[in-house]
Image (spheres, grey):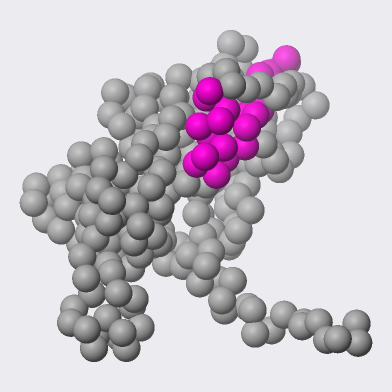
Amino acid sequence: MRYEITGDNLEVVTIHLEGGEMVYAEAGAMNHMSASMRMEAKMKGGLFGGLKRKFSGESLFLTEFTPSGSNSYVAFAGNVPGRVRPIELHGNVFMAQKDAFLCAESGVDLDISFTQKLGAGFFGGEGFILEKFSGDGTVFIHACGDFVEMDLSDGETVLVDTGSVVGFDATVGYDIKRAGGIKTSLFGGEGIFLTTLTGPGHVILQSMTIANLAAAVRPFMPSRTSGQ
């Protein structure tokens, strides 16, 4: 498999496949493809697997893409202005926010994982369900805004605005803490809680969330009146 990521504000990943190779993607993620590419919707993992994906915000069915000739390619794009990031898996496990999955090689397993701490599920910004990627191959994730990446050493902690976490290695601890005192929590503009990520492991953050993007454009959206 070969791939290239192009674009600026809304990146697209184009994947080139040869005979025997296959990628699968969330429903509706395909942007364009060659005439020699075949696609087929499948409920990967059966009904139970499809229902678990539905809980994580993904589609019940996934679409598989296989080449039927030479020079076969397929391109995928996210549904919000943002970035696409390849994650290489070779026995390691990577966790991501729900809706982050874009596409993956056939050797990658897509599953869900529940946050282990009640407070992190309620106030961590990602909810109780995270997407879990394992196996062997490349998975592509996407999220809003630009990406900020860092490698945390053992015991090193970074505090993140809730909802700004895109993904992290399974070795990274995920929790929440209160954002300072009562005055800071109420009037500091960062909310009552912050997400804490503790190493070791790799962490990917996003510069803008979908919620913040929606809030920024909401004042400029036309509003309905009683006469309409």
Image side of residue 212 versus residue 181, left or right: right
x, y percent for residue 2: 53, 29
Identify the image quadrant of the C terminus: bottom right
Image side of residue 171 versus residue 121, left or right: left
Q: Which residues are magenta?
A: 48-71
From this viewpoint, is residue 222 visible?
A: yes
Q: Is residue 100 above or below residue 133?
A: below
Of residues 186 and 98, the one drawn nearer to the viewer in this rendering? 186
Of residues 64 and 197, the one drawn nearer to the viewer in this rendering? 197
Q: Which residue is drawn at the image coordinates 17% and 52% (left, top)?
A: 198
Q: Is residue 67 magenta?
A: yes
Q: Which residue is drawn at the image coordinates 86% and 86% (left, top)?
A: 226
Classify residue 62 by image quadrant: top right
Q: Which residue is drawn at the image coordinates 41% and 44% (left, top)?
A: 129
Task: Give the residue at the far top of this rendering.
Answer: 20
Of residues 9 and 222, the one drawn nearer to the viewer in this rendering? 222
x, y percent for residue 121: 34, 52
Of residues 209 and 71, the one drawn nearer to the viewer in this rendering? 209
From this viewpoint, is residue 166 visible?
A: no
Classify residue 16 by image quadrant: top right
